[in-house]
Amino acid sequence: MSGSIYDNLKQLGGMTTLPDSPEAAELERVANPQPDVSYTVRFTAPEFTSLCPMTGQPDFAHLVIDYVPGAWLVESKSLKLYLGAFRNHGAFHEDCTISIARRLVTFLEPSWLRIGGYWYPRGGIPIDVFWQTGAPPEAVWIPDQGVPPYRGRG
């Protein structure tokens, strides 16, 4: 596919190791092939993990990332590797959730982005973290994230 929007991708189609940290993870993007249409892209990561920065114990979340692309789409394998890099990263739930959203906004410059971080209980209390860049664009279907309030979630 020489001359395609996929030419610059380095991670797709081959063996790639998990990055040592979120900062070391390389996100990749491709040109939006439908830039004249406003539409929503959803990524769901129901097995997201990170570490408590105080105890080193694992934390688990169900992440839902919705965005309305501008000129760019995130390449899904690079996003998977980026999210996987949090597995050995110590940060509070709020920091993980917002850091992911901010990096994607900076990298993709989407028309709109929101993230829902639905964290499993720590100390008996689930912590859910929500953020979005502003009001959603008009005339774009943005479905509910579909994650129930915690009561044996998942």
Image (cartoon, helix red, strand yellow):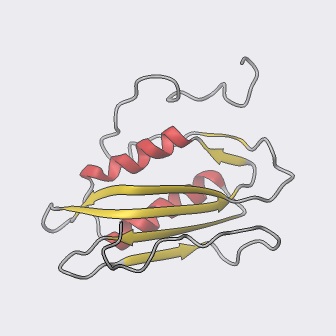
Residue 86 position, x and y percent, is 33, 53
**Side of 50 where 67 appears, left or right:** right
Residue 119 position, x and y percent, is 34, 70
Toward which corner of the image does residue 40 lie, by quadrant?
bottom right
**Side of 29 where 15 appears, left or right:** left
Pick the quarter of the image with the C terminus: bottom left
**Side of 85 where 71 appears, left or right:** right
Q: Residue at x 50, y 63 (%)?
A: 64
Pick the quarter of the image with the N terminus: top right
**Side of 103 where 57 appears, left or right:** left
Q: Residue at x 76, y 21 (%)?
A: 3
Residue 62 versus residue 78: which sits nearer the camera? 62
How many numbered marks appear?
0
Most extreme residue toward the right is: 36
Most extreme residue toward the left is: 55
Toward which corner of the image does residue 41 lie, by quadrant?
bottom right
Residue 23 versus residue 149: which sits nearer the camera? 149
Q: Residue at x 29, y 62 (%)?
A: 60
Q: Residue at x 58, y 41 (%)?
A: 75
Residue 116 position, x and y percent, is 49, 70
